[in-house]
């Protein structure tokens, strides 16, 4: 009986052992299968996810900012270029203790001269962002070396280009500026950003467990931007900018604008607004100072617009230069109230009306022209349309069609009211007369990478606006403006010049009427009048220092720029009859 019991017990043990062995084997097989399934899952189905996770932990992709194209003047002087600087990055991971991150910022603060506001912003970024943040950008090499010497885990110093404007505020409104990422935000930098900026490259930084960089490789090479050569002449730009800034200060004007061009080619030689700003420190500049007045600022042109009224009348044979009009009254009744002259003139010829800038006489001429012809001439001269200059946000001004005019409009528009224009549009009108009736497109880009600028290549061809005979008559009258009329202060010694003064009241949007105490003074002209080399428009907005007529404050700016620019260009004095001799001008100034 005991033997049977013993045998039975042994069988039970063997069965238990087999069961246990099978269970252990099943568990091992199960784990082996699970591991294989997991490996298959990781290697096949979640491979990319795993790679991305590893890359996030141990790699950082950094954009390589390309060298932005250089901007130069017409003679190769550099106006905007790139220089190499250093920037400090903080590469961190999610598992990095917050205290460690804050300690890093604390150690860098005195070296990088970080203020409390900047430190607070960095701490907020560390709490919100992943991967990396910029600690400070565009620092000098010496400071960068001090940062590298600390050997802080996660801190990387990289080379980064900085946009530099070596001439400071010179042509700042033309050039514009860029932000920290070298993206254009104004002027030429904004309008031609795609041409200038090039294409970004990329590099990968490999880091160890402690976020220390052990290797860096470039995966995509950056492509440098293209260079732009402007039609601007840096010397003439300097002269124009200096004179308009000086005049704004002397006349306590709100702002001033001046544009100089070569009328035959339409090339802009200088374009300046005052006040100006330094694009190297655009963040510290007044936003109003960054506003470009020459092609964005709109004004009522006043008497400079009489060039259009005169051209329309002569071209359509509504008047002859010898026709006379009664200008003896100091005011003329028009719908909505009288329009006045600055003095009574008596009987004046058409030539005398423009030379003396008589509103009463010009209104009578405008009435002969009529709304339809005057409007068509305005449009032919380019008013109400963009000039096409290769700069951003150009204003087209405001010119209403005749069906929108009131009974007063023909009289107001004839003398430069009820229209809104830019200084650049006034210059374009002056150029049409200088070119004897032909409108030549304005341009400011001379070439891109040595090839003619795209806008210039695609620009509309010159177009005749008025006949050469009409234009010649207008030139003769505009010469008289400077010789004996309202523009004598614009006379250029040794040269025959032609031009027109302008003075207009500023519209008060609050009172909804033109102000009696705020004015815009302007002058547009060209020299030498028989073979124009330079055309210049000058605008002073709201001069407040006891003088506000265009002939008083704008015409002298024309003269000063013209005298120095002609000397710089080596233009020989004119022998045309009626030219003011250099000696006579010297004697006049001495008296």
Image (cartoon, grey):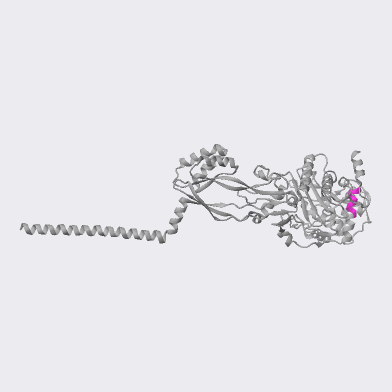
Q: Give left or right: position of 22 versus 63.
A: left
Seen at 37% across and 59% down, the residue is 39
Q: Nearer the viewer, residue 529 or 323?
A: 529
Q: Quadrant of the C terminus?
A: top right
User: Where in the figure is residue 97, as x and y percent of width and height?
Assistant: 44, 43
481 falls in the magenta region: yes
**Residue reaching furthest to the left:** 1
Q: Give left or right: position of 322 versus 194.
A: right
Residue 361 vs 247, above or below: the answer is below
**Residue reaching furthest to the top:** 110
User: Where in the figure is residue 134, as x and y percent of width and height?
Assistant: 55, 46
Q: Nearer the viewer, residue 285 or 219?
A: 219
> What is the span of residues highlighted in magenta in the rendered image?
476-484
Q: Quadrant of residue 318?
A: bottom right
Q: Is residue 39 visible?
A: yes
Q: Quadrant of residue 366?
A: bottom right
Q: Is residue 420 visible?
A: no
Q: Nearer the viewer, residue 447 or 522?
A: 447
């Amino acid at each position: 009986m005991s033997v049977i019991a013993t045998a039975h017990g042994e069988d039970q043990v063997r069965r238990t052992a087999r069961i246990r062995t099978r269970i252990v084997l099943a568990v091992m097989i199960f784990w082996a299968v699970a591991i294989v399934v997991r490996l298959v899952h990781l290697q096949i189905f979640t491979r990319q996810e795993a790679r991305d996770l590893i890359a996030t932990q141990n790699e950082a992709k950094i954009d390589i900012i390309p060298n932005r194209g250089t901007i130069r003047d017409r003679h190769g002087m550099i106006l905007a270029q790139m220089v190499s600087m250093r920037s400090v990055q903080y590469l961190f991971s999610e598992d990095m203790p917050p205290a460690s991150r804050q300690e890093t910022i604390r150690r860098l603060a005195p070296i990088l001269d970080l203020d409390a506001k900047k430190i607070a912003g960095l701490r907020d970024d560390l709490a919100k962002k992943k991967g990396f943040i910029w600690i400070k950008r565009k620092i000098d090499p010496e400071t960068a070396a001090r940062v590298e010497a600390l050997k802080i885990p996660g801190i990387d110093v990289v080379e980064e280009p900085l946009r530099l404007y070596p001439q400071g505020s010179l042509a700042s409104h033309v050039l514009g500026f860029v932000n920290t990422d070298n993206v254009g935000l104004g002027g030429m930098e904004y309008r031609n950003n795609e041409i200038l900026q090039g294409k970004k490259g990329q590099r990968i930084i490999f880091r160890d467990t402690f976020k220390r960089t052990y290797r860096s490789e470039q995966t995509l090479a950056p492509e440098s931007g293209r260079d732009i050569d402007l039609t601007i002449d840096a010397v003439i730009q300097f002269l124009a900018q200096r004179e308009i800034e000086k005049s704004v200060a002397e006349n306590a004007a709100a702002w001033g604008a001046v544009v100089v061009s070569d009328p035959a080619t339409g090339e802009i030689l200088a374009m300046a607004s005052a006040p100006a700003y330094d694009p190297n420190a655009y963040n510290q500049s007044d936003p109003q100072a960054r506003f470009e007045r020459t092609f964005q600022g709109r004004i009522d042109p006043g008497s400079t617009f009489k060039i259009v009224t005169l051209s329309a009348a002569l071209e359509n044979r509504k008047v002859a230069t010898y026709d006379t009009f009664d200008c003896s009254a100091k005011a003329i009744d028009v719908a909505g109230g009288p329009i006045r002259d600055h003095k009574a003139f008596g009987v004046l010829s058409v030539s005398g009306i423009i030379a003396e800038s008589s509103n009463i006489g010009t209104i009578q001429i405008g009435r002969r022209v009529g709304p339809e012809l005057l409007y068509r001439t305005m449009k032919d001269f380019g008013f109400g349309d963009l000039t096409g200059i290769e700069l951003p946000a150009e204003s087209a001004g405001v010119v209403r069609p005749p069906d929108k005019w009131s009974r007063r409009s023909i009289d107001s528009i004839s003398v430069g009211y009820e229209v809104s224009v830019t200084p650049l549009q006034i210059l374009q009108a002056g150029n049409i007369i200088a070119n004897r009736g032909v409108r030549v497109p304005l341009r400011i880009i001379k070439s891109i990478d040595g090839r003619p600028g795209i806008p210039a290549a695609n620009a509309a061809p010159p177009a005749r606006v008025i006949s050469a005979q009409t234009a010649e008559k207008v030139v003769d009258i505009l010469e008289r403006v400077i010789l004996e009329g309202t523009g004598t202060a614009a006379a250029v010694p040794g040269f025959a010049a032609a031009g027109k003064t302008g003075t207009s009241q500023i519209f008060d949007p609050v009172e909804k009427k033109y102000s009696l105490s705020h004015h815009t003074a302007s002058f547009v002209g060209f020299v030498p009048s028989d073979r124009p080399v330079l055309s210049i428009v000058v605008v002073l907005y709201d001069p407040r220092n006891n003088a506000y007529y265009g002939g008083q404050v704008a015409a002298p700016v024309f003269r000063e720029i013209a005298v120095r620019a002609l000397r710089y260009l080596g233009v020989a004095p004119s022998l045309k009859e009626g030219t003011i001799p250099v000696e006579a001008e010297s004697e006049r100034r001495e008296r």
